[in-house]
Amino acid sequence: MLGLALAVPFLFSSAEEQSAVALEEGRARIAAGDDAAAIPLLNSALKLNPQNLEAKRAVAGALLRQGKTEQAKSVYNDLVLQDPEYLEGQIALATIAYTTYDFAAAHSFAAAALALDPGNGDAQSIAIALQVEDAIAAEDSAAIAEAQDKAQALMLEQPDNLTALRAVIRAT
């Protein structure tokens, strides 16, 4: 089993090869729905090869799915600093900021995501949800209704988009 191979040092393989094995095992655990078991494997991959962006991206997603928001945020911040065009990272940071009520940061990350991909539904839903929050804060009923209409239209296109659903609910 690969997990056992990670516990015993490889005698004839490089750190990069060991990192690749750990990444492969971590991805297999993620595919099996076991993010909790994947995280230590992915962290091992990163210790062996800190430049392994795939392992870093995988661990960020696993942390976020495990509800470890602050840890995920830290990893995503590192990823976005390394690659400002990492769309999934920008969206993840926008989502984290929005759900933790850091609307200023959410605006910044959502704008960056939309600049990378204006048609991205996740980025659009966060931007619309932020329009709702801005309108609520301004007590602007016309702006609330406009943002609600946008959120409802997005929900028709993407019925599983929970951020758009949240925006519709907040606007009512």
Image (cartoon, rainbow, N blue to C red):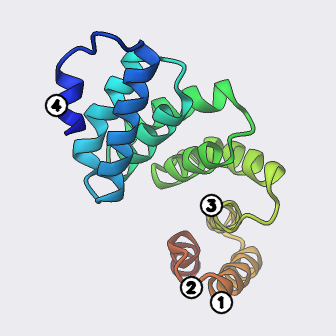
Q: What element carries label 2?
A: loop
Q: Foreground residue, 114 or 170?
A: 114
Q: Real-space Cα distance between discs 3 and 2?
A: 27 Å
Q: Residues within 10 Å of mark 2 (few under 14, many from 20)?
A: few
Query: Does the residue at mark 3 contact the one at mark 2 (Cβ under 8 Å)?
Result: no
> To which residue does mark 4 refer?
4
> To which residue does mark 2 refer?
159
Q: What element carries label 3?
A: helix
> Which is nearer the N-term, disc 2 or disc 4?
4
Residue at 62% in and 49% down: 88
Residue at 63% in and 61% down: 126
Residue 66 seen in this snapshot: no
- In percent of width and height, residue 31 lies at 36, 57
Q: Foreground residue, 7 or 159?
A: 7
Q: Is residue 127 left or right of residue 25?
A: right
> To which residue does mark 1 refer?
156
Q: Real-space Cα distance between discs 2 and 4?
A: 43 Å
